[in-house]
């Protein structure tokens, strides 16, 4: 039996799954009791998703809204906790409904135990939603 992937390797794999629009594969990287938090969530957006099922429901329609092309400027920082990483990145692509550009900056704090994501605090930039034509929540639904 091989050793579980490092948190950094698991995260890089998760990004490849998102680029491939493989949401079931991405959700498969989560622990059953995983927690996804959005500390900067604007009003009307979820602040906390508890459990793999809630995370799956939240992500199910992601490819209907955003077509990701790349994650340039990816920086993964190790922490003093071997199971926790801090990630800085951009996600770029296009908005499916309008064809407009998608360009979002993120900082995330991710914890992995036994090869599965247990905690993901996503500090995405809600100010992006204020730019004209970028409300990706309304597309495809």
Image (tube, grey):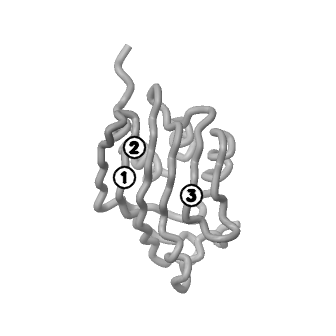
Of mark 3 and mark 1, the one earlier in the sequence is 3
The image shows residue 49 at horizontal and vertical percentages of 65, 49
Which secondary structure lies at badge 1?
A: strand
Which secondary structure lies at badge 3?
A: loop
| Mark 3 surroundings: few (<14), some (14-19) or many (≥20) residues within 10 A | some
Of mark 2 and mark 3, the one earlier in the sequence is 2
Tell me whether the residue at label 2 lies in contact with that at label 3, contact meaning CB atoms closer than 8 angstroms: no
Which secondary structure lies at badge 2?
A: helix
Place residue 73 in its image quadrant: bottom left
Q: CA distance from mark 3 to mark 1?
A: 14 Å
Q: Is residue 75 above or below residue 1?
A: below
Of 129 and 14, nearer the camera is 129
Q: Which marked residue is nearer to the observer: mark 2 or mark 3?
A: 3
Residue displayed at 53% across by 64% down: 66
Q: Which mark is residue 16?
A: none
Residue displayed at 40% across by 47% down: 16
What residue would you read off at disc 3? 38
Q: CA distance from mark 2 to mark 1?
A: 9 Å
What residue would you read off at disc 2? 11
Place residue 8 in its image quadrant: top left
Of 84 and 71, nearer the camera is 84
| Mark 1 surroundings: few (<14), some (14-19) or many (≥20) residues within 10 A | some
Q: Is residue 130 above or below residue 69?
A: below
Residue displayed at 56% across by 60% down: 39
Q: Is residue 134 above or below residue 111?
A: below
Tell me whether the residue at label 2 lies in contact with that at label 1, contact meaning CB atoms closer than 8 angstroms: yes
Of mark 2 and mark 1, the one earlier in the sequence is 2
In the rendered view of the protein, which quadrant contains the N terminus?
top left
Image position of 33 (left or right of 2): right
The image shows residue 128 at horizontal and vertical percentages of 50, 76
What residue would you read off at disc 1? 87
């Amino acid at each position: 039996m091989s050793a579980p992937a490092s948190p950094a390797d698991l995260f890089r794999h998760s990004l490849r799954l998102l680029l491939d629009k493989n949401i079931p594969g991405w959700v498969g990287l989560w622990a059953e009791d995983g927690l996804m938090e959005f500390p900067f969530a604007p009003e009307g957006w979820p602040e906390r998703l508890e459990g793999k099922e809630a995370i799956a429901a939240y992500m199910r329609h992601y490819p209907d809204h955003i077509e990701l092309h790349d994650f340039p400027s990816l920086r993964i920082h190790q922490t003093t906790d071997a199971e926790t990483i801090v990630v800085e990145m951009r996600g770029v692509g296009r908005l499916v409904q309008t064809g407009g550009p998608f360009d979002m900056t993120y900082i995330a704090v991710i914890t992995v135990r036994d090869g599965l994501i247990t905690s993901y605090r996503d500090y995405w930039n809600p100010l992006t939603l204020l730019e004209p034509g970028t409300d990706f929540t309304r597309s495809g639904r």
